Image (spheres, rainbow, N blue to C red):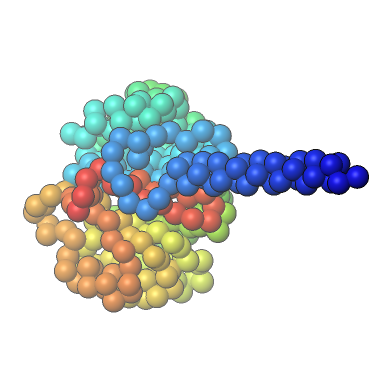
Amino acid sequence: MSQPKRGRSQQAQNHLITILLALVIAGLSMWFGAGRDGGNGPDAAATPGPGSGLTVTYLDVGQGDCTLLQCDGQTMLIDAGIGEQANHITTYLKQQGVKSIDYLVCTHAHADHCGGMKAVIAAFPVHTLYSSVTSSSNGAFQRVMRAAETANLAITVPGVGDTFALGGATVTVLGPQKHYSDVNDQSLILRVDYGSNAFLFTGDAEYQSETDVLDAGENVRCDVIKAGHHGSRTSTGYRLLYEAQPKYAVISCGTGNEYGHPHDDTLSRLRDADVTVYRTDLNGTVVCRSNGTNLTFTTEKEG
């Protein structure tokens, strides 16, 4: 009678060991498979596959702006730097496996934001082109207009409150709240939500446009804010930071640029708000990944 009992006991022990080994292997897989904060290298910019989350890449394009968002096989490019960076941008996108661009966004008609768009439109099929204006006397934007016409691509000005899907993410237009004579304040302001994570993009919007967005009661809460106007003292004010409550900020600016960006006033405000800052002039290209709950950052180089 005792022998069967020992057999069943041994079987139970073996079963328990098998379960424990499976749990250990699963845990190790999760540890090595999951992204961890920090880190450098080319894997930072790997293209995510369907259902793999949202990847936001703040490209180092010198004194300009260019941000690539990829989510569930869809792509959005916000701005495209100066014309001299066009080859760098298109090459980078191709290296990431980008075949087409679902949304190309020109925040405003300044050359350091739209200078490379002519080349982008020529290099990739673009499904939708959003801009804060449809025409401008700015030479770089006029080249965008001609490129769009050649590609039979309409330039659309989205309205405040408009939303559109980028894979599993939702993009909401928060500004500009009205027409401004100042081109910077005319910048498109976008919030991108993915799960419980949010990203805020303000172009070169300055205090007036920021204030109007806040006065309108727009939801600016975010985990990551791209500091306005390359870290200029005239953007990313205390009130915006108070309302947005970001944990991280990314500043896109060129090394030793003639404007002194980012300004000490802006860096001081970010410190006061306890915001962790990444800078393309120091860190190179900055990549942020979201799984809808957690964020991980990787940088091209140590700051």
State whether residue 220 is above or below residue 50.
below
| Horizontal and vertical percent position of residue 197 | 50, 57
- The answer to whether residue 132 of the structure is visible from this angle is no
How many numbered circles does the render carry? 0
- Compared to residue 191, the image places residue 285 above or below, namely above
Who's the residue at 22% across and 68% down the image?
267
Which quadrant of the figure contains the N terminus?
Answer: top right
- The location of residue 192, given as percent across then percent down, is 49, 53
Q: Residue at x 53, y 56 (%)?
A: 293
150, 113: nearer the viewer = 113
Image height check: is 39 above or below 50? below
Which residue is more in the foreground, 144 or 65? 65
Relative image position of residue 246 (x, y in whole percent)? 40, 66
User: Residue at coordinates 40% horizontally, 59% vertically from top-left?
Assistant: 224
Residue 255 position in % (x across, y down): 13, 49
In the image, taking residue 174 as reference, residue 231 lies left or right, namely left
Name the residue: 51% across, 33% down. Answer: 49
Residue 278 visible from this viewpoint: yes
Q: Nearer the viewer, residue 138 or 112?
A: 112
